[in-house]
Amino acid sequence: MAVTTVPHSLPPLDPPSPRPPVVAPRPPAPVSPVSGGAIVPVSATLAANEALARRRQAGKPVLPMAFGEAGLPVPPILRDALGAVTGGNDYGPVAGRPGLRTAAAGYWTRRGLPTAADAVVSGPGSKPLLFGLLLALGADVAMPEPSWVSYAAQIAMVGARAHFVPAPPGEGGVCDPASLARAVCRARAAGRRIGSVIVTLPDNPTGQLARPSTVRGLAEVAAEHDLVIISDEIYRDLVYDTAPPVTSPAVVAPERTVVTTALSKSLALGGWRIGVARMPDGRLGRVLRDRLLGIGSEIWSAPAGPIQEVAALAFSEPLQIIERIRRSRHLHAMVCCAVAATFAAAGVDVPAPRAAFYTYPDFAPWREHLARRCGVATGADLARHLLDAYGMGVLPASAFGEPDSALRLRVATGLLYGETDSERERALAAPDPLTLPWIAASLDRLAEIMADLAP
Ligand SMILES: Cc1ncc(COP(=O)(O)O)c(C=O)c1O
């Protein structure tokens, strides 16, 4: 049932800047060529990945669990389709080619979100689309604590402020609705306007899926405070238990929800750089679409033409694609649950993973022991210690907006599936991938590390 709504008002476009006063020309000041630019450090994920690569080059063993890479080969049907593309070298429409937009509209329609091709905007990955949306919206943004590393970085880049709001206990990816309402009022009292809220369904980093009642509560708060909801559903097809289906805020609040997705996770095509956004119904959707297209036209023009053609095939979901995603989901679920079980057996708190390829263990029960034995006081200390002492790459909770003192870690399993495409294909085909020697060896290594680190 749709939540009662009020028409959303986007912030007015900035008025033209006043003409600068005429001043006498001055000799140019000796400035650094990069002074005054935006300082955005390399994403925490990519930085950890580079540290692991250096270790591997030095011949040291690694357990690579920092990078959010799905770690699977290109599905053969898409590899063949890309090989057969002969055109696609014109720029094409900024929103994307009609075939891709129609296929993405069909993908959403089959998931209970009736979508017209005109409501779809594509981009070179969902990351630039999210950035474009944040730039188009302009105001401050609320998001769950913890949440994916790039949201806060992108919000800072558009000159807005990120407001972290905790998820309800035991959930992840969606702000607790009552806390969100309080954050909006607090921000308003401090002279700031929160104009949108990001949700991640299901979630990176926690691997959790918010309850439908939480999504409905969030939609009510969004309607009350006139917030746009940005629903990042890039992991939607990787929820282990497919019944009941994911409740998108676009079902409950279609007039104010933008949905983004991509092929980077479900089909492991991150390097092909293709993503799609589904605009809200009505006036807000039209205004936001126009702004996003303006931004896209000045930054990326359009995603690569041949990739759009292959993405259209993927979003049309032939049987081979459905089966590929089913097997990927099975592999992620098996390995992720085994990793979580290894942490739990060692005495670390860890919620059961419900989607994607992430677990989010909490080493708080070992806090005093870790401080005494290894001088670990923060999550970053713990991640560094695991890297230096054992070659295990993980990301600290602070990379996702949690306090430095949190001893939670995001542990990703996507790079454990094999060193070669043939190993990874065998992992995908295996009814029990945990019995494959390379996966079993990684799990054994993790158990060894935990045993060595335990009190
Ligand atoms: C939650 C989430 N959203 C979006 C993305 C961006 O993916 P892409 O730009 O490849 O579509 C990622 C990638 O790690 C992610 O984890």
Image (tube, rainbow, N blue to C red):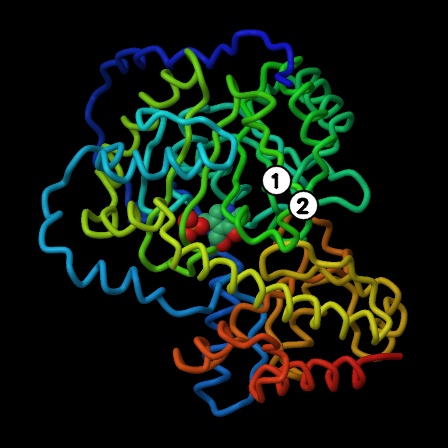
Q: Amino acid at mark 2?
A: Leu
Residue 425 rendering spot, x and y as whole percentages:
43, 76
Q: Nearer the viewer, residue 180 or 48?
A: 180
Locate the N terminus and report the quarter of the image it occupies: top right
Q: Quadrant of residue 120?
A: top left
Asked which quadrant contains residue 186, the reply is top right
Decide: is 223 above or below 178: above
Q: Which of the marked residues, 2 or 1, is nearer the chain's N terminus?
A: 2
What kind of element bears circle 1?
loop
Within 10 Å of disc 2 (Cα), the crowding (few <14, some 14-19, many 20+) is many
Q: Looking at the image, which residue is at 70% across and 45% down?
A: 172
x and y, in percent, of residue 76 in the image: 31, 67
Tell me if residue 334 comes above or below residue 229 in the rendering.
below
For this orientation, the residue located farthest to the top is 6
Residue type beneath disc 1:
Val
Q: Which mark is residue 246?
A: 1
> Who's the residue at 72% across and 25% down the image?
217
Looking at the image, residue 354 sits to the left or right of residue 65; the answer is right
Kindly indicate whether the residue at mark 1 contacts the one at mark 2 (C-beta within 8 angstroms). yes
**Badge 1, how many Cα within 10 Å: few under 14, some, many 20+?**
many
In-image side of 349 versus 397 (left or right): right
Residue shown at 45% from the left, 26% from the top: 114
Residue on which disc 2 sits: 209
Q: Nearer the viewer, residue 435 or 360?
A: 435
